[in-house]
Amino acid sequence: MTSPWRLAAAPVARMPIVGSAAFFGRNDHDFYDLWFYVWLVTDGERTGLIDTGLPIGDADRAALETANQALDPRCAFHDVRLLPEALDALGVRGEDVDFVLLTQTITYHTGGLLPNLLPRATIYASYAGVREMLCAPPGHPPTEFYFTSGTWSLLRDLAVAGRLVLTDGPVTVAPGLEFETTGGHHPGSAGVRVRCADGVVGLLETAFFDRNIAEELPIGIAEDAAACRRAIKQYRRVCDEVVALHDPGNAARFPIEPGRDSRSHPSTQGGQRHDRHP
């Protein structure tokens, strides 16, 4: 019998967004903190990451921020930690990472995907997200933000080496760990299902906050609100717990092992802690 997987969330950036962008059909002008994470997933034998954080290069990161601020000047990145810092916080060396699961092809989630940082990992990404970039260029965000030039070059090398898996899934990464395209936010939005010690945890990029899950409420900027709602409903049906990937409480719910990272994490008051840290 395989060991259960364990999860830990390392916060890597915060960006305020207006409520109408987070909650479909709501005339909400308040701003909410959207958090980005690099997740560690391990069963004690295999080590993986879910997402790789913001672009490593200053110019790539600044261009992404400028695009966000076209919506509102307050949509700026704060508390940024790049992938090397996230790996340090998680207590993991890049060369020990066996696989990376990308929940979105846009550089919010793929920015740290560079060969010197993850030299032996197999990369899983949504085929729909790559297909959209190549065959049906989107208007928002522009195509330039789907991968950095360094990441695009790496994808070519990974494909040659047989370490790139493009799938709409679901595909079994390892027993108890599944990756699949969900769509909703973007065509390439993906979900991950992880069998942990106390049940199956579903991680959804197409949900920003716990409220999206609890109310089965699509995000306000969903390209396909119906697909977003279907994904939330499906994951609530098949998972014991569903996690909105940008919720401020994720670091408290899935903490890094005490002593690995002494820096503070965002949390929501009264957030439940789960014994799933490595």
Image (cartoon, rainbow, N blue to C red):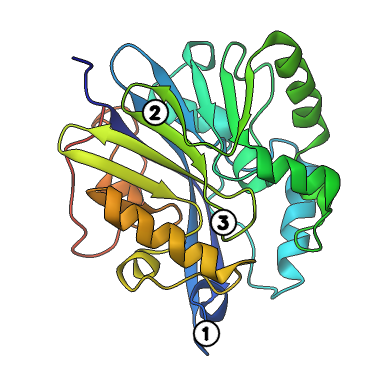
Quadrant in the rendering for residue 10: top left
Amino acid on which the number 2 mark rests in the picture: Leu
Residue that mark 2 sits on: 90
Taking 135 as reference, is 90 above or below it? above
Amino acid on which the number 3 mark rests in the picture: His
In the image, taking residue 123 as reference, residue 180 lies left or right, namely: left
Ranked by sequence position, the earlier of labels 1 and 2 is 1
Which is nearer the eye, 139 or 150?
A: 139
Q: Position of residue 212 (x, y in %)?
A: 40, 68
Residue that mark 1 sits on: 25
Q: Position of residue 178 (x, y in %)?
A: 41, 33
Tell whether label 2 touches label 1 (CB within 8 Å): no
Taking 29 as reference, is 137 above or below it? above
- Residue 264 can be seen, yes or no: no
Residue that mark 3 sits on: 78
In the image, taking residue 188 as reference, residue 16 lies left or right, namely: left
Task: Check disc 1 and report its element: helix, strand or loop.
Answer: loop
Ranked by sequence position, the earlier of labels 3 and 1 is 1
